[in-house]
Image (cartoon, rainbow, N blue to C red):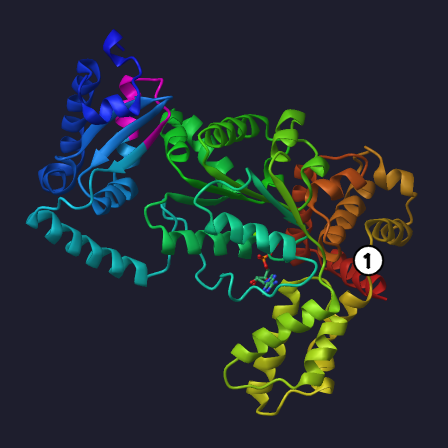
Amino acid sequence: MSEGMKQQSAADLESKSSADMGQQALWTHVKSGLKNEFGEDVFNAWLTNLECAGVEGGTLSISARTPFVRDWVKRHYAPKILEMWMREDGRVMAIEVIAQKASQMSPVETQQTALAQKQDQTQASDVLEDSFGARLDPRYSFDNFVVGKSNELAFAAAQRVADSSEVPFNPLFLHGGCGLGKTHLMHAIANKVRREHPERIVMYMSAEKFMFQFISALRYKDTVAFKRQFRSVDLLMIDDVQFIANKNSTQEEFFHTFNALVDNRRQVVISADRSPTDLEGIEERIVSRLGWGLVADIHPTDYELRLGILQAKAEKLEGTSVRDDVIEFLAHRITSNVRELEGALNRVAAYATLVGRPVTIDMTRDVLQDLIRANDRKITIDEIQRQVAEYYNLRMADLLSARRSRNIARPRQVAMYLSKQFTSRSLPEIGRKFGGRDHTTVIHAVRKVDDLRLTDSALEDDIARLSRMLRG
Ligand code: ADP
Ligand code: MG
């Protein structure tokens, strides 16, 4: 860019006393690009009156006539504006849209505002989405999250993030076992921010999706657009970040995205099934940076919390009432996680509706046999390995070795499969327990056994027998 692109203070730019010709020329160029992109109508309705207020510290500032147009432009056109600007000026990494005085609305603008508000309401009545169209589950709210000792820190932190106009801590790192409410809290943050601050750009995404998007951006040589979509957000949430362990280039990109956002004081929220320091296969510098903000862990539920959750969910059940003794029974016996607890309650209620009898403890015991047994016994990977080795008459050392002969490899796959079924260990953890294998080996084993079970009745038999022995 020309000399004229040099940075200016916001005050200068707002007074426009020193209009920067280079910048203004570029803005004119971008505007004509926008007209082509969105067509005359949209352009005249929303974009023609936008002004370039300058570039400061890598952020392009665009000003709109009214707060409403600002919000609308921010949500619908800001990413494209940024992309077009970045194509010409590589130093710009982010965009902000600001409003001029709120009072001076022309009649046309007043009308425009009303119209857009109407459009917006129709959208809002549908499923809430983040600014990039990821579906946010509207059922996940702060209101229906039951708080106990094990999750109060995570809950309070998530609320702070949703309520603060400033970034209270960056990142917020939520971690805890599966089914304990991490995704629920993230959606609750997103839902609340989307509802109360529609002008903020919110993005929620699983780490897995982040990776797939990144890979396809690489494939289609479209990484500029990929970067752009992330760097324009106010609030980025990446769920299950353990997923990108060992995925080096994805990690690298994630780290850059993360840094860019944190440096621009945008809020980042991350979840994982373990703490930053326990994340293996993630680079040290990333781990340390992830721990800079607030790390909040969600512990396994205790009896009181389980009781509270069940009571809350039971109240919402239509058509069936679940007696207190049944709720207490469930809270005692289903200890694994909230997801299973919910599932158990729903199963019993569905059964009761079906047979037209009220829920009793005996019925519950009957309907939930398998679940209760699994919750009674914590099956470990060691135990599975021992049992499988014994069953197939192998030595433990062979089972865990690198040997690939069929008579060893198959039982090993069965043991991996059972570990996935019976424990809550992650794929990388299972891999490590099997002589330090990669999690892809475990995925392969699980798929293989799943396939074989359908055609190989001897194997199916083995699995059934082993499962019975493990359940005790
Ligand atoms: P995670 O992402 O940690 O694996 P989820 O957020 O998907 O767990 O939670 C699993 C299920 O349990 C969801 O349906 C969620 O609504 C519910 N849940 C978890 N914790 C709570 C809680 N404290 N109060 C109410 N529901 C909860
Ligand atoms: Mg989750």
Residue at 86% x, 66% y: name it. Answer: 472
Vertical relation: 47 (above or below) 94:
below
Quadrant of the image occupied by residue 400: top right
Q: Position of residue 112 (x, y in %)?
A: 13, 50
| 100 relative to 200 in the view: left or right | left
Residue 56 part of the magenta-drawn span: no
Vertical relation: 319 (above or below) 434:
below
Circle 1 Cα neighbour tier, 10 Å, few/some/many (<14 / 14–19 / ≥20): some
Give the residue type at disc 1. Answer: Ile
> Label 1: which residue?
379
Quadrant of the image occupied by residue 346: bottom right
Residue at 49% x, 61% y: name it. Answer: 141
Residue at 52% x, 77% y: name it. Answer: 316
Ligand 1's image quarter is bottom right
Q: Position of residue 118 (x, y in %)?
A: 20, 59
| 297 relative to 212 in the view: left or right | right
Q: Position of residue 358 (x, y in %)?
A: 62, 90
Q: Nearer the viewer, residue 390 or 284?
A: 284
Report the magenta residues as a range: 82-95
Residue 87 part of the magenta-drawn span: yes
Is ligand 1 closer than 8 angstroms to the Cβ of mark 1?
no
Residue 135: in sight, yes or no?
no
